Image (spheres, grey):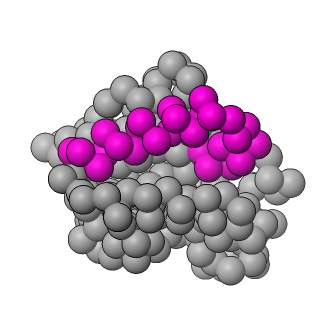
Amino acid sequence: RVEAAFPYCESLSGASRPVFGEGPADARLVFIGEAPGAREDETGRPFVGAAGEKLDQIIGAMGLDREQVFITNILKARPRENRTPTIDEIEACVPYLQEQLRLIRPEVIITLGGPATKFILQTSEGITRLRGRWGAWEDGDLRIPVMPTFHPAYLLRNYTTETRKQMWSDVQKVVELLGLAKK
């Protein structure tokens, strides 16, 4: 059970294991989602289910490999019944995410979906209004550009030409900022 390795939030104690994230410590790009799902809880790895496959496709279309980016979530363990995280759960996990960002010091962060975007940008605006507009995560002297976009799970549920164009437009802004060549 998670409480042995991750004792900071009792409400996450139903999870099997923590999912801290994965990727290189010097990643130029960090993806941040909301919380691990069932497959992530089983494997201890972020974004390994259907949404993870879609994210892998997006990363590849950007001209990168999954091994070149850091992928994590705000929550480091799966909430019971895969429900929306509570404020207490987010606050319990935030120090881990902040420390990850301080250590990695990425050039860009892509937030995936409303909860991650709202937390990182400290806003209550919804993802449909925020997506595609640059923001920033600030911590002391650290200021990292943030590109909010849809969560891959949302894209799978709403696989329309419009949502695909919007997400592609969002990631193209990151490709341009990082100077990546398309594959």
| Identity of the residue drawn at 56% across and 23% down | 128
Classified by dominant secondary structure, the portion drawn in magenta counts as helix
Query: In what quadrant of the picture does the C terminus appear?
Result: bottom left
* Residue located 58% across and 68% down the image: 46
Image quadrant assignment for residue 12: bottom right
Pick out the residue farthest to the right.
81
Residue 80 falls in image quadrant: bottom right
Residue 36's x, y, as percent? 66, 61
Instruction: Count the labels in the image.
Output: 0
Residue 84 visible, this orientation: no
In the displayed image of the protein, which residue is found farthest to the left? 141
The answer to whether residue 1 is magenta is no
x and y, in percent, of residue 119 in the image? 49, 36
Q: Is residue 164 above or below residue 46?
A: above
Q: Which residues are magenta?
A: 151-177
Q: Looking at this view, is 174 or 96 the one in front? A: 174
Position of residue 122 relative to residue 47, above or below, is above
Residue 69 can be seen, yes or no:
yes
Q: Quick one: 86 or 182, which is closer to the camera?
A: 182
Q: Which quadrant would residue 15 be assigned to in this image?
A: bottom right
Please state the horizontal and vertical placement of residue 156, each as a whole percent of the image.
71, 48
Residue occupying image coordinates x 29% and y 67%: 27
Query: Which quadrant would the N terminus be assigned to in this image?
Result: bottom right
Q: Is residue 76 left or right of residue 10?
A: left
- Which residue lies at the image location 51% right of the left edge and 19% below the top edge? 129
Residue 153, magenta (yes or no)? yes
- Drawn side of residue 46 relative to residue 95, left or right: right
Percent of width and height locating residue 58: 49, 56
